Image (tube, rainbow, N blue to C red):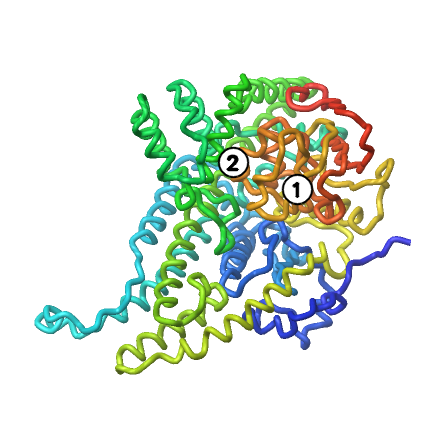
């Protein structure tokens, strides 16, 4: 018999050494003994798509701001008739979410409010989106202006003469508060359009399912795909730089891209090098505000601070250009394919239904690019600046003896950091030593051991008993938590022929190849040409890897997850939302990935040979 539910939070064992982990996080983020009955009655799924590794205490800020702001647009701004926000808790260091439905008797009253509010956005989309870019950019510029300097030995004489009557410590405290507020501000902006993008898509999706009952999910996605998206710009800029390097005969200068200064210096000194460097520098603002992670962790590496990463990608692209490969995304083919499918389905409808189809598709296509583009502005750009400033503050406090390692501020919660700063300015102000250097180093080490112990266990994909039906749009579109998917995680539903995993059919095509399991962006250099990428989740910034691999398989993610969108744009098969691929599959096993059906078979037969049934360019065979 298959189980009908997932483990309860209290059923999961605490990894040895992680006892007392609950104290690392604010009280409102952990399950409460007094609420056990209510919390156990709810279904929670693990969002390992955005938070694949254990939170250090400070890092909960990304989860808190993101999920709180997502919820406010459903519940308070747009008044979505059938979905409020998503409750969230941290359990054993991982983030779990529980969508909140709207009580049946309140749905009808929200409909007219919802229609008026989304109508305003859809009628003024371009103007409002332009304003959005200005707002977000303004926040980023303000964050850039913040700095955390050591306090001076004494107040300068001119402050005495001018009657300023302040010692500068207020600037330090205010700068910290302001940095937190500005991050919060851009997270509020983040969701202003995102929920609308999902709503427009879901509306078109449901309409298509009604008029074409057998339409594959992917065909619907293909009909609205945005080809020229800002999220692809960083990768496209690297491709242009690689092409230019070959054109100028500079490819020999990329032998050791790990030494950034030497590489750039030898390029600059070579004939044609100045022209290349000029293009490289102009690409950096803003496109190098890009992380190999997803922007939610203090350890995420950004291109502009680790230029060996983009230079390494460029070197890789140069090798492929020299091999005669076309490295640019097949934009013309994608557009032709999109138009072909639109035409095919549109022709099956009569006049009035055709007009409805055109309207809904047009709206979804207008809103769709934002679903990915916002990611560049918030997760990458805003959070890149935010983490850089936090590291600066951490290093200043490290120099004052508050902790042993430069980035150890991440082991404090954000409100504890405010206390540590007040401790610092108090000691400085009264002419005594602050308490922090005697308190924090041992406490940080204690917490580091707990976090490391939590990292030894993988999260459960979900907790408690799933509801009979799941309606919240984000949960379905982004996370791929649908009624069918959850049943398949529990081992119900149809078994995969020959054994294997079932997930979302996220991008069409069938390929076979060897698995490469990746748990961390730092392992990306291990990916070999022609392998199948298996990951908890992929980040949008892994773009350059998509040119190497044959297919992608992820643990979590729906039709609108980054992995699904990026694979469709690169013409690669993808199966998302398998629940457990990254822990079930081992690197080197032979897989058959069927992105049209949403299945992954583990063949593990060394003699299977390189069979490619269909892959990039074989799109046209993949829909009925």
The image position of residue 294, as x and y in percent, is 52, 47
Total tally of numbered discs in the picture: 2
Q: Residue at x 39, y 39 (%)?
A: 260
Which element type, helix, strand or loop, lies under badge 2?
A: helix
Q: Residue at x 75, y 65 (%)?
A: 8
Which element type, helix, strand or loop, lies under badge 1?
A: loop
The image position of residue 172, as x and y in percent, is 30, 67
* Pick the front one: 135 or 346: 135
Question: Which of disc 1 and disc 2 is earlier in sequence?
Answer: 2
Q: Which residue of the protein is positioned furthest toward the left in this rendering?
A: 161
Quadrant where the C terminus lies? top right
Q: In the image, is 336 to the left or to the right of 461?
A: left
The nearer-to-camera label among 2 and 1 is: 1
Q: Residue at x 34, y 53 (%)?
A: 143
Please say if the residues under marks 2 and 1 sit with CB atoms less than 8 Å apart: no
Position above or below: 144 against 433? above
Residue 161 placement: quadrant: bottom left
Position above or below: 445 against 500? below
Position above or below: 118 against 30? above
Q: In the image, is 233 to the left or to the right of 525?
A: left
* Pick the front one: 166 or 208: 166
Residue identified by numbered label 1: 558
Question: What numbered label is drawn on residue 367?
Answer: 2
The image position of residue 321, as x and y in percent, is 50, 21
The image position of residue 517, as x and y in percent, is 67, 43
Can you see residue 469?
yes
Can you see residue 210?
no
Q: Residues within 10 Å of mark 2 (few under 14, many from 20)?
A: many
Q: Residues within 10 Å of mark 1 (few under 14, many from 20)?
A: many
* Pick the front one: 559 or 146: 146
Residue 477 placement: quadrant: top right
């Amino acid at each position: 018999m298959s189980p009908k539910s997932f483990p309860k939070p209290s059923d999961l064992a605490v990894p040895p050494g992680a006892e007392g982990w609950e104290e690392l996080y604010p009280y409102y983020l952990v399950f409460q003994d007094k609420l056990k009955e209510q919390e156990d009655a709810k279904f929670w799924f693990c969002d390992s798509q955005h938070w694949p590794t254990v939170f250090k205490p400070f890092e909960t800020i990304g989860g808190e701001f993101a999920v709180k702001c997502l919820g406010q647009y459903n519940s308070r701004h747009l008044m979505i008739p059938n979905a409020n926000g998503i409750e969230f808790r941290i359990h054993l260091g991982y983030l779990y979410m529980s969508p909140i439905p709207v009580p049946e008797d309140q749905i009808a009253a929200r409909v007219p409010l919802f229609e008026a509010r989304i109508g305003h956005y859809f009628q003024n989309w371009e103007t409002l989106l332009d304003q959005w870019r200005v707002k977000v950019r303004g926040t980023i510029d303000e964050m850039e202006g913040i700095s955390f300097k050591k306090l001076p030995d004494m107040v300068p004489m001119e402050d005495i003469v001018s009657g300023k009557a302040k010692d500068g410590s207020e600037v330090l405290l205010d700068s910290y508060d302001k940095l937190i507020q500005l991050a919060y501000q851009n997270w509020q902006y983040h969701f202003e359009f995102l929920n609308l993008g999902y709503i427009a898509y879901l509306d078109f999706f449901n309409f298509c399912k009604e008029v074409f009952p057998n339409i594959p999910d992917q065909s619907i996605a293909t009909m609205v795909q945005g080809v020229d998206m800002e999220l692809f710009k960083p990768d496209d800029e690297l491709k242009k730089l690689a092409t230019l390097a070959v054109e100028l005969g500079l490819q020999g200068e990329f032998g050791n891209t790990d030494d950034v200064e030497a590489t750039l210096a030898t390029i600059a000194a070579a004939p044609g090098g100045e022209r290349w460097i000029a293009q490289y520098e102009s690409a950096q603002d803003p496109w190098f505000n890009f992380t190999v992670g997803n922007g939610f962790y203090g350890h995420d590496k950004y291109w502009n601070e680790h230029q060996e990463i983009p230079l390494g990608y460029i070197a890789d692209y140069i090798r492929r250009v020299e091999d005669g490969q076309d490295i640019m995304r097949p934009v013309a083919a994608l557009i032709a394919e999109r138009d072909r499918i639109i035409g095919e389905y549109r022709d099956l409808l009569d006049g009035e239904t055709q007009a409805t189809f055109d309207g809904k598709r047009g709206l979804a296509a207008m809103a769709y690019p934002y679903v990915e583009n916002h990611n560049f502005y918030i997760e990458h750009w805003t959070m890149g600046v935010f983490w850089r400033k936090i590291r600066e503050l951490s290093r200043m406090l490290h120099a004052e003896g508050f902790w042993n390692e430069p980035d150890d501020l991440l082991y404090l919660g954000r409100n504890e950091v405010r206390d540590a700063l007040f401790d610092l300015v108090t000691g400085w102000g009264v002419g005594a030593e602050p308490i922090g250097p005697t308190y924090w180093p041992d406490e940080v080490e204690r917490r580091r051991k707990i976090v490391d112990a939590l990292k030894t266990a993988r999260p459960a994909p979900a907790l408690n008993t799933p509801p009979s039906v799941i309606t919240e749009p984000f949960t379905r579109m982004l996370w791929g938590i649908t009624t069918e998917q959850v049943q398949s995680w529990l081992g119900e539903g149809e078994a995969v022929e020959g054994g294997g995993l079932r997930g979302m059919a996220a991008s069409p095509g069938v390929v076979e190849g060897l698995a490469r399991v990746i748990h961390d962006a730092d392992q990306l250099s291990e990916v070999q040409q022609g392998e199948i990428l298996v990951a908890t989740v992929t980040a949008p910034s892994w773009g350059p890897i998509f040119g190497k691999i044959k297919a992608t398989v992820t643990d979590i993610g729906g039709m609108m997850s980054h992995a699904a969108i990026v694979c469709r744009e690169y013409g690669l098969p993808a199966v998302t939302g398998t629940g457990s691929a990254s822990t079930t599959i081992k690197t080197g096993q032979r897989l058959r990935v069927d992105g049209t059906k949403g299945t992954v078979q583990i063949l593990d037969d060394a003699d299977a040979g390189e069979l490619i049934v269909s892959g990039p360019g074989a799109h046209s065979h993949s829909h009925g």
